[in-house]
Amino acid sequence: MKKFFVLVAVLMMFAVLFYGYSTKQTKYKLEFTAENIPNVFEKYELHLKPQIQDEDYPIVNGLKPQVYELLDGGVFIYDFKDKAKLNQGIEQVQKTFQQKVYVYPINNILIVYMPGEDDPAELTNEIHTKIQRILY
């Protein structure tokens, strides 16, 4: 009888831990919106400086981005209405941007990080890794 109660207690503890972990992961990913991404980046010491909206910024799938400066590079945030438009936007990014960029889709948002032209590869890789950790 004692073994039965221990087994039940262990199973219940496992269920509670698993539920808490899965809820935390799901909740965290669902909180990303185009408006709060700069705040999330700020918590991880990636300071996005808002830029004035300009017609010269790359339009992807008909959308103008929210544009932020990040060190010598830039971060472009596109807020699509559905997954199909997001997927089309991902395909169009490489055609639209003329240099190497990193693309991060999350929910219906497409984040494009464009490193500065003179940024060293180590810095670019560090920022890319930080962004991946933040979003995924």
Image (cartoon, rainbow, N blue to C red):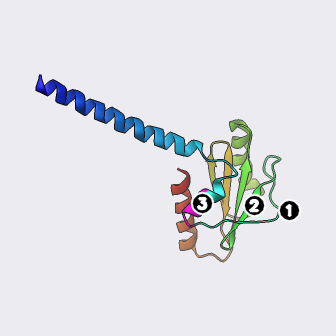
Q: Mark 2 and mark 1 in contact (Cβ < 8 Å)?
A: yes
Question: Dot 2: within a 10 Å radius of its alpha carbon, few (fewer than 14), some, or many (20 or more) residues?
Answer: many
Label whose residue precedes the other's in the sequence (1 or 2) = 1
- The kind of residue on which mark 1 rests is Asp
Q: Earlier in the sequence, mark 2 or mark 3?
A: 3
Looking at the picture, tell me which residue is in the foreground, 15 or 77: 15
Mark positioned earlier in the residue sequence (1 or 3): 3
Tell me the chief SS of the magenta region.
helix
Name the residue beneath numbered marker 2.
Answer: 67
State the extent of the magenta-drawn residues as a range: 40-45
Give the residue number, with chain letter if any, for mark 3. 41
Residue 83 is left or right of residue 28, and the answer is: right
Residue 62 locus on image (x, y percent): 83, 47
How far is mark 2 from mark 3, CA to CA?
14 Å
Element carrying mark 1: loop
Give the residue pinned by disc 1: 54
Compared with 33, 48 (above or below) is: below
Snapshot quadrant of residue 115: bottom right
Please, which residue is most extreme toward the top here?
Answer: 1
58 on left or right of 43:
right
Name the foreground residue: 54 vs 41: 41
Q: Residue at x 68, y 69 (%)?
A: 73
